[in-house]
Amino acid sequence: MEQKTMTPTQGSSRREFIRTASAAAAVVAAGNVLKTPVYGQNQAPSAGRVVGANDRIVIGFIGVGGQGMAHVRSIKNNAADNNVALASVCDVSKHRINEAKAAIGGDCAGFEDYRKLLENKDIDAVCISTVDHWHTPCSIDAMNAGKHVYVEKPMTRYLDEAFRIHDTVKSTGKKLQVGSQGCSDAKWHKAASLVKGGKIGPMVIAQGSYMRNSHKGEWNYPIQSWCTPEDVNWKAWLGGVHKKVEFNNDHYFRWRKYYPYCSGLLGDLFPHRLHPLMLATGSPEFPTRVCTIGTKAIHTDRLTPGTPERDVAESIQMLAEFPSGLTLIVASSTVNEQGFRDMIQGHKATLYMAGNRVQLTPERPFTEDIDPETHEGIQPGEDIKWHEKDWFQAIRTNKEPHAGIDLGIKVQTVISLAEMSDRLKITCLFDEKTRKITTADGKEVKPLTYGSSDLS
């Protein structure tokens, strides 16, 4: 229970599957990439089953690697409480399919092609934990097949894809939850209620960080012996990426290090802080300006024999501006774990968020007008089981999930502009009405996407 104290001073073949991915990538690279939905547009969307308040929700899993299996275990462990059933799994690895089927048990079906899973009309929703460049086709095809979607963060690899997902959510009415589980940590919602209640006055600056450190480099996961060309459908795994490489188990396990598949810190760690911090502002906005600096000076990969140097940065600092005048500062690193204090600074008071606690401290000129507040024991905390539960409740009650599309599209816009700013060494200005990106002098900049660079 929250405690508040106040003090006065304080079916298809592999070939067909691969051909579909290649065709989708070709369409993505062409035309006005921020507007027109692509995947599944050749067929009318299916409405899917309407899930009632007491109906069991049947779940399928697309991608059952490390995070995918975490969802399998969590959803299975809480299946009775959430009234859900686990029906089938999909992965491009035979080993991982068998591992997931064994974990679920019963008559769980396994597929290599996610479209086969989507053909099952008994499945109400899918949990997508694939490599980042598969988030968009899987999500959009799932919604067009009448399924609700839980998609791991980042929501998409590139910005054009994010708007396609956004437009599909709006057209199908399906519930999409981005897998940034911090958004189901109640302290961020308490902070948002204080902001919306006017307790801190107009927001000025928000800041946060997500930091890690290791001897041999983040994401240098062990290479497993089962990963062979016979086990993994490598061409399907590559999907729509522009830079095609021969089978490479380093890329398969350590894909977060390489730009064709991931934006590194921006895609993996930034969402852990960006989603909840933007949620805590009470009224998340699209950014108007983003500037980012990424560095790669420690070269931790040299300490892991057999792995190439990473493409992505080891440390990143980002500055974003919003229409309200709020400035957001976020930092992330894989080579130093000392972070910034999470806070939102208002004209009249500042909020500090940590653990299960939110503290409101008045600014000196306003101590006669505003009392300090400390809210402790705020529950629930951050855990994927609460984030999954929120998604199930959203499906049943038709509410917006904690990390739904209205928040997700704004966060992904920040992430994608931050990647462009760092890689192109520019400041990116964004117009939410036209979805256009420009430099400070008004020159339009084409967004990064598949085929826009050698590392895509």
Image (cartoon, rainbow, N blue to C red):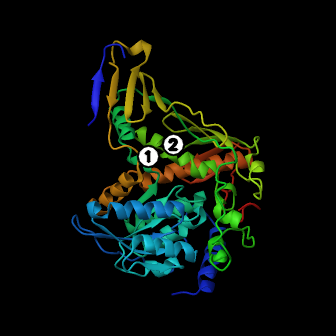
C-alpha span from label 1 to label 2: 8 Å
Question: In which image quadrant can residue 112 be found?
Answer: bottom right
Residue picked out by circle 1:
182
Q: At numbered mark 1, what does the secondary structure look like: helix, strand or loop?
A: helix
Crowding at label 1, few (<14), some or many (≥20) Cα neighbours within 10 Å? many
Question: Which residue occupies 49% across, 63% down?
Answer: 68
Residue 36 visible in the current orientation: no
**Above/below status of 373 relative to 141:** above
| Image coords of residue 436 (percent x, y) | 61, 53
* Kind of residue sitting beneath label 2: Arg
Q: Nearer the viewer, residue 12 or 168?
A: 12
Instruction: Tell me what residue is drawn at x 56 percent, y 62 percent.
Output: 161
- Sort mark 2 into few (<14), some (14-19) or many (20+) by Cα contacts within 10 Å: many
Give the numbered dot on residue 425: none
Going by the picture, which residue comes out furthest to the front? 225
Q: Observer-nearest residue: 440 or 295?
A: 295
Give residue 225's position: percent from left, percent from top. Answer: 65, 69
- Quarter of the image with the N terminus in it: top left
Q: Which residue is mark 2?
A: 273
